[in-house]
Amino acid sequence: MHILIVDDDPLQRNLLAGFLIKQGYTVTEAATGEETIRSFRQLPVDLVLLDHRLPDRNGDEILAELKRINPLVRVIMITAYGAVDTAVRVMQLGADDFLEKPVDLTQLLQHIQTVEEGLYIAADVAEVEKAINTSDLPVRIVAASPAMQQVLSLVMRAAASPWTVLIQGETGTGKELIARLLHLLSPRKSGPFIPINCAAIPEGLFESELFGHEKGAFTGAGGRRRGVFEQAHQGSLLLDEVGELPLAVQAKLLRTLQERSVQRVGGEQLVPVDVRVLAATNRDLKQMAIDGTFREDLYFRLNVITIDIPPLRQRKEDIPALVHFFLNKYHSKAVIDDQAMSQLTKYSFPGNIRELEHILQRTITFARSPVIGLRDLPAEVRTLQNQAVEGSLNARLTEVERQMIIEALDRSGWVQTRAAESLGISERVLRYKMEKLGIEKKG
Ligand SMILES: Nc1ncnc2c1ncn2[C@@H]1O[C@H](COP(=O)(O)OP(=O)(O)OP(=O)(O)O)[C@@H](O)[C@H]1O
Ligand SMILES: [Mg+2]
């Protein structure tokens, strides 16, 4: 939990900060109302300890402004000894609790713990109370399973806040869909939503894609170009496959996030940008941070709120609903018989929802009667083997790609640089494809 301590008296501030840091909390300090609001806008604060008497602004006013910026924030007001009327008023204004000066540290800790528990309970209650009605959402999404209901509940709570969200999940689990939903439920919904796939940016063009460039900044640069940060001004930017960013670009990205402005390649001035950043990845960024292939400070910057989307095989309750969803999407009048449906729920869907969608497209196209049975399902589902061996052009091509990559890796003793070279692709693209196709070294 991140706590912002607001007090104009440095001694009092240090005392509280020292104590709370020892208790394991993340702490930021502010001495004035202005500093409070500035820090609050920049940091993912959960709780504010607010001294009611500040030199520059009134505590009531600051409380109201904090709640306006983030209605989910908790505030404990610190009031003068015996100032009962103040205490009553701040509670009415939405403070969660108050303490009188001089602050008793044991008591403070108890109050903080109560707020902390309340945060978790509030989240649970919201989840249990109302199953989220997906037809009210601004995107079409299936969430029949408790796991997806939980994801949506988190999305709804996170959407209103200004913080960065890291969306994690295997390929095809719906990361981009969730990012779109976060944007559409946010106060920025009428601004642009710009997704960029970091894995698809050609080597050497990262900076120009993200931050833009000035006319003639490098060979072939042509005229001035706005990067995705500028394009997403007043909206949301989805950095998809963010784990694919080279370290040098990660450093510049971190700077951009901290300074809320970009410097175009070949440009001098800083261009301010107002962008909410969403990031998605199917890699284990935390592990990458430990291994040193992803900047730790950037990881923490991006990971203010994490949304984990579970793979489809861990939320099989969604499968029947998704089957109907996609039949409907393709205007199919076909009916799936019980045997076929039961077989579909047994399959593990390594490609998750995207794979389910492709399987249904194929099945609808090739079905021999309006009632789809076992025999109409693709071989991998019928035999419960995870490889696509027959079917559409795309499925066949994917399979050929997978075979070629595995062969090249085998030939090179799984040295990725050499395998990539023999395939005529960059190592980065190879890693991306391995990830996408679920290719891992065995044993
Ligand atoms: N819960 C859901 N309900 C309905 N459709 C979904 C759901 N989740 C994903 N989809 C659909 O499945 C497809 C894949 O989703 P999406 O592109 O968001 O996945 P992803 O996690 O970004 O995949 P990748 O890692 O390959 O980029 C899209 O067509 C999306 O609309
Ligand atoms: Mg995606």
Image (spheres, helix red, strand yellow):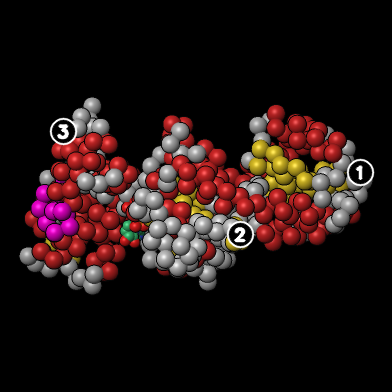
Q: Is residue 132 above or below residue 10?
A: below
The nearer-to-camera label among 1 and 2 is 2
* Residue at which label 1 appears: 81
Q: Relative to the observer, which residue lies in front, 198 or 102?
A: 198
Q: Is residue 303 left or right of residue 320?
A: right
Q: Residue furthest top?
A: 443
CA gap, disc 1 and disc 2: 51 Å
Q: Which residue is mark 2?
A: 269
Compared to residue 306, the image places residue 373 above or below, namely below
* Picture quadrant where residue 283 is located: top left
Provide the residue span drawn in magenta.
Answer: 386-397
Please report the residue visible at 62 percent of the width from the left and 52 percent of the height from the top. 259
Which amino acid lies under the numbered mark 1 shown in the image of this protein? Answer: Tyr
Task: Give the mark count.
Answer: 3
State whether residue 265 appears in this view: yes
Q: Nearer the viewer, mark 3 or mark 1?
A: 3
- Point out the tag, 1 or 2, that comes first from the N-terminus: 1
Which amino acid, by three-letter code, is at mark 3? Arg
Q: Which residue is mark 3?
A: 411
Q: Percent position (x, y) of residue 361?
A: 19, 63
Q: Is residue 262 left or right of 222 when viewed as pictured?
A: right
